[in-house]
Amino acid sequence: MAHLLSTENFTKIGEFIYRKTGIYLEKDKHYEKLAKYIDKRAEELGVDSFRKYFFKLRFDDADADEFQALMNAITVNETYFFREKDQFEALVNHILPELHATMPTNRPLRILSSPCSTGEEPYSMILHIVEEGDIVEKRDIEVVGIDIDSTVIEKAKAAKYTERSVHAIPKNILNKWFDKKSFGYDLGEDLQGSVDFQVANIFDKAQMRKLGKFDVIFSRNMLIYFDDASRKEVAMTFYDMLNPGGYVLLGHAEYMSRIVSVFNAKKVDNTLIYQK
Ligand SMILES: C[S@@+](CC[C@H](N)C(=O)[O-])C[C@H]1O[C@@H](n2cnc3c(N)ncnc32)[C@H](O)[C@@H]1O
């Protein structure tokens, strides 16, 4: 059976998604998945054409539920604990001690995980902070995790993980901070609530402003889904959200020097970090 979404309309909805989220969908890679989603969603809504679905998405979506459902369907949420572990080591051994020494002492140090997907990245920060160094005894630290996909934020809050998700956590740390269940692991009570999770779109300036200022921003494995113009916009958003002297860390395949030149790049151990 033919899909409701024609290849011509794929371009239209692709532009709409790109404008709202920076996510750039390619016909070869994404048409089939998006077309199947729209067939399913149109049936649920009782509409019989792409035009009617697209109208609802753009003009009849006051609470943005339809847009949220579309986002939840198209995002790629792959993540796991201790992914690119060197960066968590750099955070706890270099960045936080330096910021503790240089930033005003009357406030907490604030870290943003943007995007956090199902929470493994911000919880990996917390695990490194409680397991290594002594920063946790000296200074309050706040960790905030955001993602555009509301289903992953719900999962992050629930903090129930699969064997695959926790495979890179050393056994002693896993046994100490998680409860083994018949399927997978639950984050233990001591660390429940240690991250403030919120649904937010990095391109929504009002939502970003509401989060406040940060000292460290991790933004790993999201920019790869954007084109150059969107990467530049996001990099400048991070620049605005950072306190002077604060740092950005990107995924291993992402380089700030190819995007904007406003940050100073430094190397600590094996990790590139970018300072405002
Ligand atoms: C591959 S995951 C990366 C998770 C984690 N940072 C890591 O490296 O393991 C990419 C995430 O980016 C989120 N994302 C994509 N576009 C976004 C946007 N405009 N605003 C916020 N999050 C976005 C997706 O929902 C997805 O969960």
Image: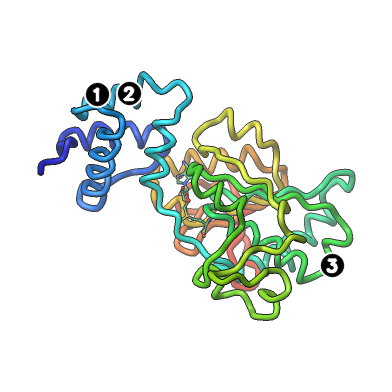
Instruction: Give how far across and how far down residue 251 sits, in percent.
Output: 51, 60
Instruction: Look at discs 3 and 1 and give the one toward the viewer.
Output: 1
Dot label at residue 52: 1
Alpha carbons under labels 2 and 1: distance apart: 6 Å
Dot label at residue 134: 3
* Residue under numbered circle 2: 56
Q: Amino acid at mark 1?
A: Lys
- Whether tag 3 and tag 1 are in contact, CB under 8 A, the answer is no
Instruction: Give how far across and how far down residue 59 sits, in percent.
Output: 36, 19
Alpha carbons under labels 2 and 3: distance apart: 53 Å
Disc 3 residue crowd, few under 14, some 14–19, many 20+, Cα 10 Å: few
- Whether tag 2 and tag 3 are in contact, CB under 8 A, the answer is no
Pointer 2 or 3: first along the chain? 2
Residue 227 visible in the displayed image = no
Splitting the image into 4 quarters, where does residue 101 fall? bottom right
Instruction: Look at discs 2 and 3 and give the one toward the viewer.
Output: 2
Splitting the image into 4 quarters, where does residue 45 fall? top left
Front position in the image: 30 or 186 = 186
Front position in the image: 132 or 234 = 132
